[in-house]
Amino acid sequence: MKATVTAFEVLDALGLAQLEKRSGDLGGSVPLRVAQACAPLFEGNAFGFQITLRQPIVLRRSPGHVAVEIAAPYGEAFTAAHRAVLPRLVAQGILRADGLLPTTFADDFVKLASASPGDVRVHLWTGLCVRADAGVWLRVSSAANRRNRFFEVKAHFIADDGAFAPLILEITLRPDAPDRIRIEGEIGTVAAVAPGVRIEEIPLLQAPEIGAAHAAFYDAAYFEAKAHGPTRKYRKTDLPDDLDRDAPARCRVITLGPAAHTVTGPLPCIVFSNLVPFKASYDGYTVTVEPQESVLRAGAREVERAFAEALGPSFLGENRRAMWYFTKYFSPHPPGEPHFFVKPWAFVQTPPGWSCLLEGVHGEGFDVLRGIVATDVFHATPAVFQLYRSGEPIRVACGVPLLHVMPIPRRLLQAGYREATLHH
């Protein structure tokens, strides 16, 4: 991909897949309101590069076995090309002879990893090899906001060890998936991320300026404008540059009340879990959310107490509508959209020039969508639910993970990649 700044190299050894940059409006398929005003979701749609199959693949499963079908003449061509290219990759020093690809994928680019009842997993070599630049890691994950819901892709990282690595996806078929699954188009995402992040956990009492910034954003003028339509206030916010890209990124998760998060992973990531048990349904026009009211009220009181301790008892009365962002915990979308927000009771603060990837989980009957929030200027990290079944409600228990929040410098969000080639 041509770009002023690049962060990794890509070698297409097989012709099975390619990387494509997805548009924020998903080719015009998102609601107009999202395209015009919801910058975090718009940027989440376009995050990274989509791993896109050039030809459809059919996975046909039977007890203890998964067969791969590709329409002629492509199936035979890919099989022959796969067997021919592996010796070249080793001979040219791109891959080690004892590495994962030559030893595990010697005879096919798809391998069955598990075929136990309820757990059918395959490893698929995309035909691509990638090499991250120094100081950059690559995150491989699902296609997120537009994806085939009959399978999941396990997220993993590729470190900057100076060598090419095969881009392999671990695909898990859902138990309710049909025995014959057609996989085509976008099947995953690869994106440049930064190692060396540090995440500190503190209460709002130690960062009252973050609470004050939240109230300043949701001021009286915001709600007056909102009464007439989308404010686009977030989209209009000036974003600072990355002031010191060589220094370790020091980030903070700032708790407001009941805490339900962990910091985990090879690259530190904040995992927010649900704090209020609820069920939600969509009838084609309206989303109805039914929380456990006693838990919601108790949590809201703790949130108000945290703000009062940090900013004074008069703060609540002066900024009541700004407090609703958290104390209501749930916020609906306009009629006709199967979406609603869940607001973790915490802020996230990153250094200037850093945003956060909000990677939602996928549950039974719902997805929490992927988004990008400029957490150096706006510190809330909402989980945006999308319901994809009508009638039967979804149910989400307390403690269920909702959102993985990972700090990423915006220079990497905007970076491209370089194309490498095999020698003849």
Image: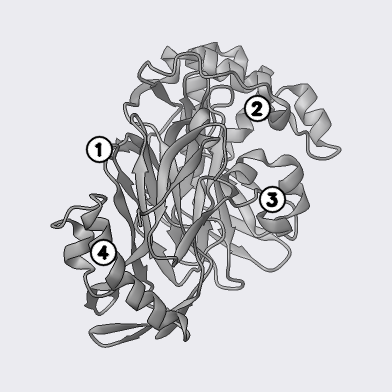
Q: Nearer the viewer, mark 4 or mark 1?
A: 4
Please name the amino acid that badge 4 sits on: Leu
Q: Earlier in the sequence, mark 1 or mark 3?
A: 1
Element under disc 1: loop
Q: Residue at x 20, y 63 (%)?
A: 102
Q: Earlier in the sequence, mark 3 or mark 4?
A: 4
Question: Is the C-beta separation of discs 2 and 4 under 8 Å?
Answer: no
Q: CA distance from mark 1 to mark 2?
A: 46 Å
Nearer the N terminus, badge 1 or badge 2?
A: 1
- Whether residue 87 is visible here, answered yes or no, is yes
Q: Position of residue 62 (x, y in %)?
A: 30, 88
Q: Position of residue 18 (x, y in %)?
A: 49, 59
Nearest to N terminus: mark 4 or mark 1: 4
Residue 61 placed where, x, y %?
33, 85
Q: Where does label 1 land, which residue?
A: 161
Residue 284 sits above or below residue 288 on the image: below
Nearer to us in this view, 417 or 248 = 417
Rendered view: 391 above or below 376: below
Q: CA distance from mark 2 to mark 4?
A: 58 Å
Mark 2 or mark 3: name the one nearer the start of the chain: 2
Graded by Cα atoms within 10 Å as few (under 14), some (14 to 19) or many (20 or more), the crowding at tag 1 reads some
Mark 3 belongs to which amino acid? His
Q: Quadrant of residue 166?
A: bottom left
Spot occupied by residue 369 in the image (x, y as percentages of width and height): 54, 51
Q: Give the labeled residue for mark 3.
A: 333
In three-dimensional space, the C-alpha distance between marks 3 and 4, rounded to whole angstroms, equals 50 Å
The residue carrying mark 4 is 86
Is 348 left or right of 123, judged from the image as shown?
right
Q: Quadrant of the N terminus?
A: top right
What label does residue 379 carry, if any? none
Disc 1 and disc 2 in contact, CB within 8 angstroms? no
> In percent of the image, x 31 and y 36: which residue is there?
267
